[in-house]
Each structure stands twice: as C-alpha cells, then as structure tokens.
Amino acid sequence: MEEWDSIGVNGCVGAEDEYDRYADKAYVMLIEGRSAAEIADYLHYIASDYMGLRESDGRRRLADRIAQRLVQLYPSLIDDSNEPF
C-alpha cells in the first residue's frame, strides 16, 4: 500500500486491507513463475480497467517498477526449503 496505492487510501482508517486481494494474486503469479511484465500488466489492468482510473504513462511506469521490485523480492519470501510461506 505504501508503494502501490492506486486510489490513494494509504492512511485511511478501515482501508488497511484494500489491496490484499490484488497482492494475493500478484504473489500467486510470482509462485507460478510469471514474469515482471505479466505482473505489471496485471497491476496496470487493476488500476486502469478494474478500478476505472484514467490510463497514464505514470501509472504504467509505477506498475512496471512495482512488478520488478516484487520479482526481485520474491527469493527472500521463500524459506530454506524453497517452499513459499
């Protein structure tokens, strides 16, 4: 929520879980070995189509940046037995 807050609810009481289902889907995509480009497409779709926000280059760049970061962080989310938490 701190880095990908498409509708600007970070800090709003009651919105702490606003993006959980999207994060869950992105995590499943990581487990499945999906690429950063595929995850970025998903995040961009959620923001621009599903949430109905206006498409913009900035929104696309943010999705790309977040997807790259998720792919980079994924190895740290796996325990020593290579099983996802």
Image: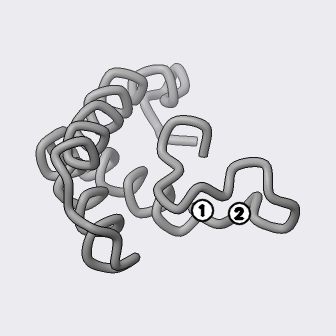
In the rendered view, would you say 5 is above or below 55?
A: above
Q: Tell me if 39 is positioned left or right of 17 in this view.
A: left
Report the disc number at residue 57. none
In the rendered view, would you say 70 is above or below 13?
A: above
- Which three-letter amino acid code belongs to the residue tagged 1? Asp
Label 2 and label 1: CA atoms lie apart by 5 Å
Image quadrant in which you'd find residue 25: bottom left
Colouring convention used in this rendered image of the protein: one colour
Label 1 SS: helix
In the rendered view, would you say 70 is above or below 29?
A: above
* Outermost residue to the right: 13
Q: Tell me if 5 is positioned left or right of 33 in this view.
A: right
Residue 68 pos. (x, y %): 26, 29
Residue on which the image places disc 1: 20
Label 2 SS: loop
Badge 1: residue crowd in 10 Å (few <14, some 14–19, many ≥20): few
Residue 27 pos. (x, y %): 42, 50
- Which three-letter amino acid code belongs to the residue tagged 2? Asp
Q: Tell me if 17 is positioned left or right of 24 in this view.
A: right
Q: Tell me if 2 is positioned left or right of 24 in this view.
A: right
Q: Which of 4/72 is in front?
A: 4
Badge 2: residue crowd in 10 Å (few <14, some 14–19, many ≥20): few
Residue at figure coordinates x 51%, y 36% from the top left? 3
Residue at figure coordinates x 40%, y 29% from the top left? 74
Report the disc number at residue 17. 2
Image quadrant in which you'd find residue 61: top left
Q: Which of 76/11 is in front?
A: 11
Residue at figure coordinates x 76%, y 58% from the top left? 16
Residue 17 pos. (x, y %): 71, 63
Whether label 2 touches label 1, CB < 8 Å = yes
- Quarter of the image where the C terminus is located: top right
